[in-house]
Image (spheres, coloured by chain):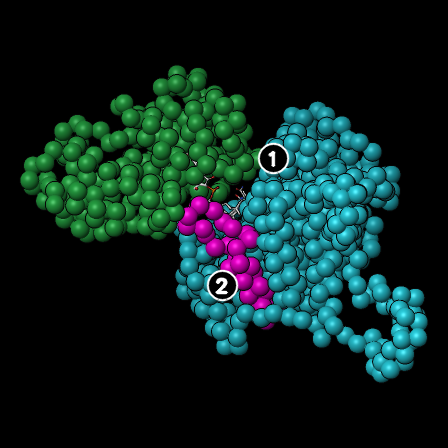
Chain colours: A cyan, B green
Amino acid sequence: MRPTVEFLEEGLLERIVSEAIDILCKIGVEIHNKPVLEMLADHGADVRMDNYRATLTEKIINKALVSAPSSFKLYDSMGNEAVDLSEDNVNFTPGSAAINILDYETGKIRKPTTSDYIRYAKLMTRMDHIASQSTAFIPADVEAKISDSYRLFLSLLYCEKPVVTGAFTIDAFEIMKDLQLAVRGSGEELAKKPLTIFSCCPTSPLKWSDVTSQNVVDCAKYMIPVEYIAMPLAGFMSPVTLVGTLVQHTAETLSGLAISQLTNPGTPVLYGGSPAIFDVRYETTPMGAIETQMIDCAYNEIGKYLDLPTQAYIGLSDAKLLDAQAGLETSIGAILAALSGINNISGPGMLDFESCISLEKLVLDNQICGMTQRLIRGIVPKEDFPMIDRMEELLHEQHLLISDHTMKYLNEEHFMPSQTIDRANRSRYEEEGGLTLNQRAHQEAEEHLAGYKKPGLADDTVKDLVRLMEEEAKKYGMDKLPEREE
Amino acid sequence: MDILKQISESLQKGDHEKVAMLTSQAIEEKIPVKKILDEGLIAGMNVVGEEFKHHRIFLPSVLLAARAMYAGMDLIKPLMIRDNIPTIGKVVIGTIKGDLHDIGKNLVGIMLKGAGFEVIDLGNDVTPDRFVQAAKDEKADAVGMSALLTTTMTGMKDVIELMKSEGIYGKIKVIIGGAPVNREFAEQIGADSYAYDGMKAVEILKEYVKDK
Ligand code: B1M
């Protein structure tokens, strides 16, 4: 039996959804994008151009729900299946778009560089329990206007895994799409084998900016999967109650679904988000708060009820260092998310309200993800009945270390963490240097980096990627991209 | 109890109706407007600020107090204009060009207003031109900029450069905030200060206008 957790009882879930639809059909959404408003009007929405408001209809919402696929897959840059976003499959991906990196040497944050990004992408090739990469942070050594596409470029060059990403402007979509076309060869291939997911955020309450709504439309045109990241902040930008925030989150997410599905029915989407409670003492949006995580798990239930694959920013921490708070918030989140069956869990590596990446934390979180994956495989009998023979074997041999049964099931039954997780006895721990968690994680990161192997992209593809990125950089006055190590 | 003390205490409780009533009464009693402002409204808000800082009250209570502050301010404002009494300060705020994050900026605006500042909020996606024009038109004491993106924070420098070329840099203070910026960045671009949250912004700006 797979262990699960549920927060919404029957009846409540339906009421949340119907209330959200009611809001969309009575109050509507504000969308700062004339073509999108016109499209909604064509489908029967009541649209007012002067205040950008579209009041949707049940028909629009139902149409969008029917055409949105209930699952999809991501493929790596070599075209191999890498992430299965269906049913209750659980996959992890690093938290994305951090502002800072936590520097191991100084223990302080700083703005990341190209070289940090390459280390990150290389490390991601070796994070076995994290199925996709994300454009996890913004290298600050390139012109700001290309910093969103540049991180996708580096990710594609150094790591085969599919990429969770997003554009910061309308214009950036073009190059970010072209980079993908260079990898896949054609738009058709890209649609058949999605390589990325774009995060597109409505603005709570009930609003879409021109940038993010246009990103939804542009992705739909190329069948590039989108994850909707609504961020109602309970008690501030949404009702203080978790139920109220869920209603608002549902309405905001369904409005995004309508935009993409009317643009191009069948475009893959993730029912996602990054809601949080608002901390009324510190004026912050804690991702590690237990209530934030409860909202995430609950909207996942709503997404599943609507027959859509899901995503959440969960399994991350607001701690500033790789400390006990980082571990506890990340673990609670990852475990709850996995028990809930969230399909794509965005979190590993992230600290400080989604604003800081730590490579050491990424290494630790990879272990948390592995443990979590083990957890949801649950407890199931494996040639355990009858057990008389095995007991006799044990009594006779005095141990089962080399029993056939052990050899067959050891790796399946016991998750084997890396040396970052301390399981040595104290004497050995001390003799091996008495390293802190941070030191062990750093050591592991260095080992992974030493064992790095480049993706098998064809030389011509690499050349295309470099040419596209260099041309884009030139457009914004950068004649040369920063040096890249092999 | 002294009526000014009553205003202060009602404000601390967030009772905007009572603050309005007491302020009217104080005006009728011919208590100088400046005194009502300083010893009634602002005195109350100072206590609220301290209480909040020490987690003895939470943000909603601060905003309730701020609402009570506006209730009092609305009544004394015409008299302040009549008698040429300035507000404690005027601040032009906005989120920098290209950036749509405005939650933090809005909160800072509410807190500043609550502390008695006059706030001109330019919204989000604000160009350097608009910041500088508004600062000049409004004869602001300070310009407050917010940025939440690595890609937009550099726009703050453009505003400062334009302030320099327009001859208002140094005369009008510059305060910045938002997740990607910090004190060093403020120093680098020539901003006078950096605030990590709304209360801090109030504290810093109050210090700037102290001698006004
Ligand atoms: C005048 O003087 C002052 C003084 C103090 C000042 C001040 C000015 N301004 C702020 N302060 C200070 O006082 C305030 C009160 O205490 C504080 O303000 P804050 O704003 O910090 O605090 C608020 C009270 C609560 N905090 C917030 O409101 C920000 C929270 C996070 C999660 C966030 C949110 C909510 C949003 N986002 Co955005 N968002 C993130 C944020 C993560 C983070 N750690 O900040 C961040 C900033 N976002 C990010 C991104 C990538 C984006 N976001 C986007 C959109 C959004 C939403 C619309 C969904 C929403 C904003 C809604 C709104 N109306 O503002 C997009 C931006 C579009 C654009 N062009 O602007 C988009 C590009 C995503 C996309 N692909 O669509 C990341 C930045 C990446 C980077 N390196 O630059 C990010 C760190 C999250 C992440 N990891 O992805 C202090 O900083």
Quadrant of the image occupied by residue B152: top right
Quadrant of the image occupied by residue B76: top left
| Amino acid at pointer 2 | Leu
Nearer to us in this view, B66 or A76 = B66
Q: Which residue is mark 2?
A: A246
Q: Determine the secondary structure under disc 1.
A: strand
Whether the residue carrying mark 2 lies under 8 Å from ligand 1 is answered with no
Q: Determine the secondary structure under disc 2.
A: helix
Nearest to viewer (mark 1 / mark 2): 1
Q: Position of residue B72 (x, y in %)?
A: 20, 43
Seen in the picture, residue A250 relative to A284 is either above or below; the reply is below
In the drawing, what numbered circle is on residue A109?
1
Q: Could you tell me if residue A37 is visible in this image?
A: no
Q: Quadrant of the N terminus of chain A?
A: bottom right
**Chain for numbered disc 2:** A
Asked if the residue under mark 2 is in contact with the one under mark 1, i.e. CB atoms within 8 Å, the reply is no
Nearer to us in this view, B19 or A200 = B19
Q: Position of residue A212 (x, y in %)?
A: 55, 48
| Amino acid at pointer 1 | Ile
Q: Is residue A273 left or right of residue B27?
A: right
Q: Residues within 10 Å of mark 2 (few under 14, many from 20)?
A: many
In the drawing, what numbered circle is on residue A275?
none
Q: Are marks 1 and 2 on the same chain?
A: yes
Q: Position of residue A245 (x, y in %)?
A: 46, 61
**Residue visible at 51% across and 59% down?**
A291
Q: Specify start and end residues of the magenta stretch as a single range.
A: A276-305
**Residue visible at 6% across and 40% down?**
B29
Seen in the picture, residue A130 relative to B125 is either above or below; the reply is below
**Residue lying farthest to the front in this orientation:** A427
Q: Quadrant of the C terminus of chain A?
A: top right
Return the disc, 1 or 2, that comes first in the chain's sequence: 1
